[in-house]
Image: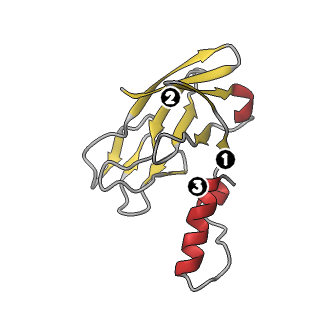
Amino acid sequence: MNRRCFLRQMEAAALAGGAGLSASGCLGFHYVNATIRTDRALVRRADFGDRRYVLVDVPTLPLPLYVYRNDDGSYSTVSTRCMHQGCQVEPVAGHLVCPCHGSEYTNEGAVLRGPTRYPLDRFRTELDGDHVVIHLVAS
């Protein structure tokens, strides 16, 4: 569990009157570390294992990035910030869902269902040897 997830879980536990940590939320998602190089994040391809996606915390961004391995072997990266009211979208059954108001997005960030009207911010993503390179300026 990364620091951001830990803090969210602790906050939720405090609001619930000190109840134990929930098994939902961040605990079920696969976070990986990235090497940050100025305006790029490098994620090792091996960190995906057999998973289709990973979540990457970038210290300069308020929410993690969702990096998805496409059927053709390419990768796509989107922000996990819902464009409706800013909640963090979560991977659910092959797409992304906002737990706050139900907006749904494809793995590439296109809108499947509102209330949002705008796609997720995308980040240019390319392969460089054993790494997935994410350019940290939204495109």
Residue drawn at the location 54% of the way across and 42% of the way down: 59
The quadrant the C terminus occupies is: top left
- Which one is earlier in the sequence, the residue at label 1 or at label 2? 1
Question: Would you place residue 134 above or below residue 14 in this image?
Answer: above
Marks 3 and 1 in Cβ contact (< 8 Å):
no
x then y, percent, for residue 34: 64, 33
In the displayed structure, does residue 80 sit left or right of residue 21? Answer: left
**As shown in the figure, which amino acid type bears the numbered disc 2?**
Ser
- Return the residue found at the far left: 117
Marks 3 and 2 in Cβ contact (< 8 Å):
no
x then y, percent, for residue 84: 29, 53
In the foreground, 55 or 7: 7
Number of numbered discs present? 3
- Which one is earlier in the sequence, the residue at label 3 or at label 2? 3
**Which residue position holds label 2?**
76
**Label 3 vs label 1, nearer the camera:** 3
Which element is circle 3 on?
helix
**As shown in the figure, which amino acid type bears the numbered disc 3?**
Arg
The quadrant the N terminus occupies is: bottom right
- Label 3 to label 2: alpha-carbon separation: 23 Å
**Which residue position holds label 1?**
30
In the foreground, 33 or 104: 33
Using a 10 Å C-alpha cutoff, classify the residue at mark 2 as few (fewer than 14 neighbours), some (14 to 19) or many (20 or more): many
**Which residue position holds label 3?**
4
**Label 3 vs label 2, nearer the camera:** 3
**As shown in the figure, which amino acid type bears the numbered disc 1?**
His
- Which one is earlier in the sequence, the residue at label 3 or at label 1? 3
